[in-house]
Image (cartoon, grey):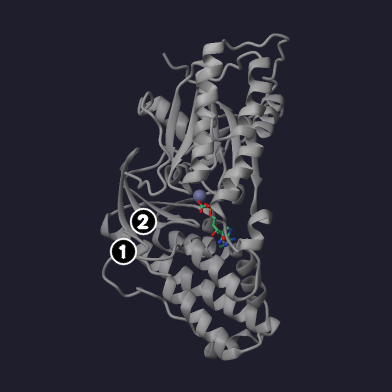
């Protein structure tokens, strides 16, 4: 029988963040995210095989660190696993020789920590990167005989938007308790990340239906590609955002904006879909036309681009809320860290009187806390889908 305060290890390796978190019920014991962005910068985007290699190199050291932080690393002078289990682990990690070596040096030399289950991202994402996380989770589960709960990364982003820090009721309480906010259904989730832009209808927990999606590039992808066109490093979202912010503070902007207007793709289409690749192409043409770009040009384009993305997201989301009679909006994914987009949705919610939940800045981009909490929700609802072989599913849809 499940304890209410189950101890869950969350692992996230779907893209370029190696992230692990340990929670005990709603209490956070440890949460570490290691970004590979600097390593991928030279390629202008995430290079899957490199991401896989970095995950394989970093998973074990991060795991050791979160156990230390949680005071759950208890060394034992003996080698605690049998030959049979070692064989199984060797098979699971046969493609990850470096990780296997680190694993066998560490895991059998500590006492089994009281972890009840492992929540692991099974997709969507880069398959080579997903596989490393899954194999690592399976290897730990084999040694410690605990279940592995497969989690959809997009469900993780939804959960992360609903996590709110519980204010300690006395100064003696530790301020690391989160609450999963109770919401009213139906709700609409706008998920905006590097690989996805979709509107999801939630009739209830775990009852998802995609009601709109991008036909080409994701919003984050459009930010990253536009940044590249402007000569800015990966990931482009924060870069564009910073430039656009400073353009908003520059008085000369109003004049320039007129000649730099960009399209609002599919703004008037009757469906709930998006398209961002034309917007990026419009930026490309504009930049070609302008020739050498001044610092002011870059700022003005960044602002106009951000305004265009924001407007389309707001209009389509408003339409979705009305169409499904939803009074709750959840916004998650890396792009939800964008200040302008957050501000526009806060205004929309205030003007229309619906409830808005957006991930905190720290939890907007990929992290393992959201995966651990999604695992906790699933455990409590008895919807864990454990026991089946977990496969990396690069194109997994939320359903
Ligand atoms: O959710 P996420 O961390 O990873 C995926 O699941 O894809 O999202 C990453 C995306 C990147 O495209 C990044 O440029 C974008 O989120 N991003 C932002 C901002 N911070 C991150 N986009 C716009 N404004 C930001 N402040
Ligand atoms: Zn993500």
Residue 248 position (above or below residue 334) = below
Query: In the rendered structure, which disc, 1 or 2, sits on the residue that comes first in sequence?
Result: 2
Residue 272 position (above or below residue 92) = below
Could you tell me if residue 144 is visible in this image? yes
State the SS at label 1: loop
In front of the other: 101 or 70: 101
Task: Tell me what residue is drawn at x 53 percent, y 37 percent.
Answer: 132
Residue at the spot of label 1? 272
The quarter of the displayed image where residue 325 is located: bottom left
Whether the residues at callouts 1 and 2 have beta carbons within 8 Å, the answer is: yes
Near mark 1 (Cα within 10 A), the count class, few <14, some 14-19 or many ≥20, is: many
| Whole-percent x, y for residue 340 in the image | 56, 66
Instruction: Specify the quadrant that holds the N terminus.
Output: top left
The quarter of the displayed image where residue 214 is located: bottom left
| Whole-percent x, y for residue 146 in the image | 48, 19
Q: Is mark 1 within 8 Å of ligand 1?
A: no
Residue 261 position (above or below residue 173) = below
| Whole-percent x, y for residue 15 in the image | 54, 49
In front of the other: 127 or 123: 127
Residue at the spot of label 2? 199
Residue 294 position (above or below residue 123) = below
The disc placed on residue 48 is: none
């Amino acid at each position: 029988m499940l304890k209410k305060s189950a101890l869950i290890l969350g692992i996230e390796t779907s893209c370029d963040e190696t992230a692990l978190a340990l929670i005990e019920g709603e209490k956070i014991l440890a949460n570490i995210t290691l970004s590979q962005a600097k390593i991928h910068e030279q390629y202008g985007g995430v290079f899957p095989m490199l991401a896989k290699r970095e995950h394989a190199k970093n998973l074990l050291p991060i795991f050791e660190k979160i156990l230390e932080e949680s005071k759950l690393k208890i060394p034992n002078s003996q080698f605690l696993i049998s030959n049979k289990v070692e064989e199984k682990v060797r098979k699971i990690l046969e493609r990850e020789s470096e990780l296997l070596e680190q694993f066998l040096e560490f895991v059998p030399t500590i006492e089994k920590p009281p972890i009840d289950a492992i929540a692991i991202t099974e997709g969507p994402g880069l398959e080579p990167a997903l596989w490393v996380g899954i194999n690592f989770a399976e290897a730990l589960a084999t040694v410690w005989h605990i279940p592995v709960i497969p989690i959809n990364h997009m469900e993780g982003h939804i959960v992360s938007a609903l996590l709110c820090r519980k204010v300690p009721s006395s100064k003696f309480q530790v301020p690391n308790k989160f609450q999963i906010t109770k919401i009213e259904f139906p709700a609409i989730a706008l998920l905006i990340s590097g690989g996805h832009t979709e509107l999801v209808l939630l009739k209830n927990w775990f009852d998802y239906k995609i009601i709109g999606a991008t036909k080409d590039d994701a919003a984050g992808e459009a930010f990253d590609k536009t940044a590249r066109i402007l000569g800015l490093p990966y990931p482009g979202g924060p870069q564009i955002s910073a430039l656009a912010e400073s353009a908003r503070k520059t008085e000369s902007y109003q004049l320039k904006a007129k000649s730099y207007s960009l399209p609002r793709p599919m703004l008037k289409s009757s469906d709930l879909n998006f398209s961002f690749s034309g917007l990026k192409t419009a930026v490309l043409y504009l930049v070609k036309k302008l020739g050498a770009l001044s610092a002011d040009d870059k700022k003005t384009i960044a602002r106009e681009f951000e305004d265009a993305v924001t407007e389309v997201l707001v209009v389509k989301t408003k339409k979705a809320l009305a169409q499904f009679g939803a009074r709750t909006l959840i916004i998650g994914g890396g792009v939800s860290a964008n200040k302008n987009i957050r501000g526009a949705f806060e205004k929309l919610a205030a003007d229309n009187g619906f409830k808005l939940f957006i991930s905190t800045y720290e939890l907007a981009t990929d992290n393992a806390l959201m995966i651990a909490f999604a695992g906790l929700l699933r455990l409590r609802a008895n919807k864990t889908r454990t026991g089946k072989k977990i496969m990396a599913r690069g194109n997994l849809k939320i359903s």
